[in-house]
Image: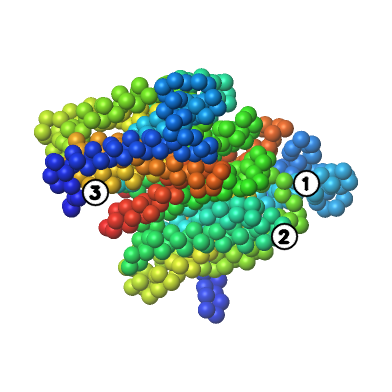
Amino acid sequence: MNHWYSFRGRKYSFQISRRTLWVITLLAIVNVIVAILCVGLGSQYIRPDNVVRSMLGIGDSVDSMIIFSLRMPRILIAILVGAALAVSGAILQGVVRNPLTSPDMIGITGGASLGTVVFIIYFSEVSIRYMPLSSIAGAFGAALLIYILAYRGGVTPLRLVLIGIGMATALTAVTYMLILTASFTPTAVAVKAFTFMTGSIYGVSWDRDVTTLLPWILVLLPVALFYARHLNVQELGDDIAESVGSSVMRKRTILLMMSVALAGAAVSIGGAINFIGLMAPHIARKLVGPAFGGVIPVSALIGSLILLLSDLVARTTFLPLDIPAGVFTAAIGAPFFIYLLYQSRKAA
Amino acid sequence: MDILLSTRNQKIFALLIATLLLAAGMVCSIAFGVTNISWQTILSALNHFDGSQEQLIIKTARIPRALIAAIVGASLAVAGALMQGLTRNPLASPSILGINSGAAFFIVVGSAYFSAGSLSTFAGLAFLGAACTAILVYILGSIGTDGLTPIKITLAGAALTSFFSSLSLGILLTGGQTFDQVLYWFVGSVSGRDLGIFNAAFPYMTLALMGAVVLARHMNVLALGEDIASGLGQKTIYIKLAVGLVIILLAGGSVSMAGPIAFIGIIIPHVARFLVGTDYRWVIPYCAILGADLLLAADIGSRYIAFPKEVPVGIMTAILGVPFFVYIARKGGRR
């Protein structure tokens, strides 16, 4: 039997099991180790101990330069984007009560991509700092549209998913149209936009990307963690949730909004990276059970890990080519999805 | 269910009108475009070809384009009708269930890694890709004790679509060869194709369309449910295999000609059923003609939406298709 630790505040309380704490600590350590390895690997190899030395400020100056100005931003972005996508997926799966959904599949990521591409094409002279705003607006727009269209005296998960899939296709089409018809489209811009749509964290920088994304994640992740307990109630189904006193529709709306904001923020910097939102929550549930207090932080850590590794493979295996990381998350994501379907055979 | 055309005469009459529309659509598709060409020139391009710029446009661009739009529209619509019947999913269609992107992926891989260049190889690759994806989606959708549920097969299709298009885009981005051209094809377009690609896949698709007409009677029996169908003496497994083969030929051929074009396969079967009811002997021909009508119309429209730049027709159909999709999803998700 698990041992549970309780944390109580004046209005809130939550429990966390000893096992969950262990898993979180372990994953955090693995993340740090992988991050250090990732920083070292690349066209110029840097030994892990030298990486650590540089981080402590006592390393070789050339190493430090490479690490801090080139590799660190990318690693940090991978961690942040991975975590955001994973948590977004975890919340969405809880709300929709379908373990096979994710923000990319039901059009939220598509909306964010559209928002970003609109920004790239029409607001290119505006500061890049506002790009997350544009993506989040796109994600919200798409989510709102899907929600309204699926609304019919309430929103059932099935309708949400079906309509989301249709919208995803349409949003991708509109995005392609914008790219292809934009008046200036030289091939280079099209390639950039398409790289973005596949999901890539290539060429990120400190002041532009990391500091743009960090505040969003720092605000949204703790709120998600805080709100996780409502997900546990949502999972019971509308009738039970209502009878235990939860205002189902209102909570569902708030939770969806958080999922959307996280996905939107992640897409604005990382592009449309698919399948992390699907995979990470599943692995998390396997590790710590279905209670969302544990699933949310563990998902975040696993999401970071997946994206760190995908990006590592993407930028090192085909040197000097830099392949979008999204290609690799898709390459492992689809077989994973098949495995999930295969698993659900027993559950049904 | 209320249907619009109840008597046999009405059905035949409406089908004739749709066929006339198809002919008119072909003529319009050949006549209208960025370059203004007089009717006189169009006629003489067919009768006495003199090699002038305008006649060349008619011969090498407009006519292939019109033919391709018509056959692709017809094929996708019929494939959609058969898939909806086979999977009992009102949203099934070659695009939603990932068949289109699977076929596209095979072509991308073939041209990037095995230097496949000839048109007949493209067609072959598309058929192969369509077949593999169809089998995969069908298996994935029917895993589990509750069998083939609409939501499972739709999700499986969505997952495979995003898998194949991510990989295809990745390959395209790193391949770097004639990116622009492949890009337009990748989004789904009927422009810039020559008759060669039409000739490569046309025989198979015609064969498959005829096969669909032949199978219509059996689809009617299958629609009663598998138990009843086999009780009536139908070898359901053979019928299903035959229908599957027809779907693969139709979808694969379409992709090899025009790339992955979305939503025709969803919209048209519903329109056809609204018009003539559920009898496949009527639904199939209606789907073929109306599908061709719609894609021709969308293709003509796509030339003017961002004039003088052309929008790939796949984008037009995707945007046109959403309201229908939403309508059907709302109806289907009621329970």
Numbered disc 1: secondary structure:
helix
State whether residue A277 appears in this view. Answer: no
Numbered disc 2: secondary structure:
loop
Q: Amino acid at mark 1?
A: Leu
**Please, is residue A65 above or below residue B138 in the view?**
below
Residue A63 lies, in percent from the top left, at 84, 43
Mark 3 chain: B
Res B169 → quadrant: top right
Res B12 → quadrant: top left
Residue A33 lies, in percent from the top left, at 69, 46
Q: Amino acid at mark 2?
A: Ser
Mark 1 chain: A
Can you tell which mark lies on residue A127? 2
Q: Which residue is mark 3?
A: B274
**Please, is residue A232 above or below residue A201 in the view?**
below
Furthest-left residue in view?
B232
Mark 3 or 2, which is nearer the eye?
A: 3
Can you tell which mark lies on residue A70? 1
- Crowding around mark 3 (Cα neighbors within 10 Å: few <14, some 14 to 19, many 20+) is some
Q: CA distance from mark 3 to mark 1?
A: 60 Å
Q: Amino acid at mark 3?
A: Phe
Q: Residue at x 56, y 43 (%)?
A: B309
Q: Residue at x 24, y 49 (%)?
A: B274
Q: CA distance from mark 3 to mark 2?
A: 51 Å
